[in-house]
Amino acid sequence: MRSLRKRDVETLLADYDGDPVGALAAAMQQVLEMPGEVFPALVRAAGLPVDRQRRLLDHEVDALDELARELNETRTLGSAATPAGR
């Protein structure tokens, strides 16, 4: 897993309002080093808790916003990928 660069985060935030799922997928592709992968596969590969995966896959706005905030603040998914959440 790698961290997003400043310009990656800027792109995420710039694209998020128009296409939240696409913007998150692009950022997750970089963090997970899975270029070209689709959002559902990225969510499953991220090691997120099952309930959080379900909410993201259902495109719940609060869950999408939470993931965008996490990627913006931490520049990675490390804080979410805990063994207890698997």
Image (cartoon, helix red, strand yellow):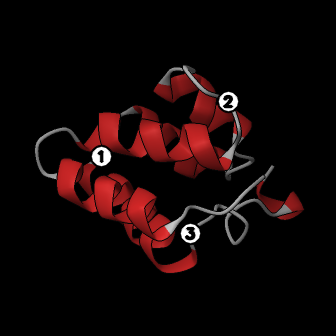
Residue farthest toward the right in the current orientation of the protein = 83
- State if disc 1 and disc 2 touch (CB < 8 Å): no
C-alpha gap between disc 2 and disc 1: 23 Å
* Residue at image mark 2: 34
The percent coordinates of residue 35 (x first, y second) are: 60, 27
3 or 1: tag closer to the N-terminus = 1
C-alpha gap between disc 3 and disc 1: 21 Å
2 or 1: tag closer to the N-terminus = 2
SS label for mark 2: loop
Which residue corresponds to the image point at 39% horizontal and 71% vertical from the top-left? 69
Which label number is shown at residue 71?
A: none
- Rendering quarter of residue 44: top right
* Residue at image mark 3: 75
Work out whether residue 29 or residue 5 is closer to the camera in this orientation and state it: 5
Q: What amino acid type is highlighted by mark number 2?
A: Met
Q: Is residue 78 above or below residue 44?
A: below
Q: What amino acid type is highlighted by mark number 1?
A: Glu
Residue farthest toward the bottom in the current orientation of the protein = 73
Which mark lies nearer to you, 2 or 1?
Answer: 2
Classify 10 Å Cα crowding around label 2: few (below 14), some (14-19), many (20 and above).
some
3 or 2: tag closer to the N-terminus = 2
Which mark lies nearer to you, 3 or 1?
Answer: 3
The percent coordinates of residue 21 (x first, y second) are: 32, 37
